[in-house]
Each structure stands twice: as C-alpha cells, then as structure tokens.
Amino acid sequence: MSHAVTLNSSAILTDTVQYSYSATVEPPARLVVLAGACPLDKAGDVVAPGDHAAQAAKCVENMIVALAEAGASLENVVSTRVLVASSEQADLVSAWDVVRDAFREHPAPSTLMGVTVLGYPAQLVEIEASAAVRD
C-alpha cells in the first residue's frame, strides 16, 4: 500500500526542528480525524497525575489505538496538536519529547501549546491528530 501522506521540509526555514513544516495528502485518501487523545486508562481515570511525560505517553498509546480502530497508524498522521496544561516551557518540552520520540520515523507537522486547563481533573496533556489512509 502506498502512503497517502507526504511530509515536507523547507529549504528556507530552519532545519533544526524535529518535525515537518507541512504535509500533503495525496488522493485518493480517506481522512481520519481523532478526538483529542487523553491520558485515560480503561476505567476512565487520568493516569500519572502531575507527570507530563507519563501522561503524554498514555495519550500516544491511546492515539495509536484510536488510529488502529480507524484503519490507520502513526505513519498516516497528517498533523498533530499537543496541548499541555502548564505555563512552564520545561513541562511542554517534557511532553513534546515523548510525542517526538513516538513520531521519530514520521515527524508529522505539529503544534505544541501551553494551555490553562484541560477537560479532566488532573489532566495535563491531550493530543489531537488527523490522518489520511488509502484503503
């Protein structure tokens, strides 16, 4: 199966970033839009209160499951948005390092944002993603 997503770097912008600047979806492709992946266990409880990296890891794990159920994988991700409930850059970087490592082979375009609060008590991280697949 050929990939529907082509990642694009830039000859003009800095090459020190660890993600692509854009992604192109090649037709024909089916778009998969995920709800934000949260750091929830099967019982619906937030895991690892206070630990940005551990919550990011659980978000990635849950995102992989949601992608698989839609017939996709990390290789099919077009872009992500990583939301981190903190005003401290170190907390954002802690979560980002986990996400970046998960996408090492497919560094999809991503936005990393510090936010005031997320939806569940003790939730520190959420990851949104869109993917494209050829069936």
Image (cartoon, rainbow, N blue to C red):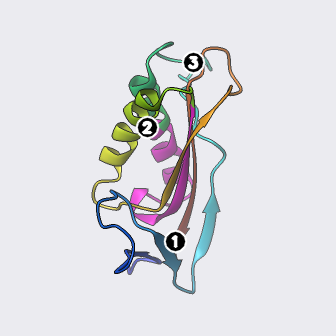
Residue type (three-letter) at the residue carrying disc 1:
Val
Residue type (three-letter) at the residue carrying disc 2:
Glu
Q: Position of residue 4 (x, y in %)?
A: 47, 78
Residue on which disc 2 sits: 61
The one of 15 and 63 positioned closer to us in this rendering: 15
Q: Residues within 10 Å of mark 3 (few under 14, many from 20)?
A: some
Q: Secondary structure at mark 1?
A: strand
Confirm whether residue 134 shows in the render.
no
Kindly report the distance in space between the C-alpha atoms of the residues bearing marks 1 and 3.
Answer: 30 Å
Q: Earlier in the sequence, mark 3 or mark 2?
A: 3
Residue on which disc 3 sits: 46
Q: Secondary structure at mark 3?
A: loop
Is residue 22 within the magenta segment?
no
Confirm whether residue 53 shows in the render.
yes
Q: Earlier in the sequence, mark 2 or mark 1?
A: 2
Kindly report the distance in space between the C-alpha atoms of the residues bearing marks 2 and 1.
Answer: 19 Å
71 relative to 27, above or below: above
49 relative to 70, above or below: above
Closer to the camera: disc 1 or disc 3?
A: 3
Residue 28 appears left or right of 101: right
Q: Secondary structure at mark 2?
A: helix
Residue on which disc 1 sits: 133
Asked which quadrant contains residue 73, the reply is bottom left
The quadrant in which the N terminus is found is bottom left
Magenta stretch, residue numbers: 60-84
Q: Residue furthest bottom?
A: 27
Residue drawn where x is 34% and y is 62% of the image: 106
Residue 12 appears left or right of 117: left
Q: Residues within 10 Å of mark 2 (few under 14, many from 20)?
A: some
Circles 1 and 3 in contact, beta carbons < 8 Å: no
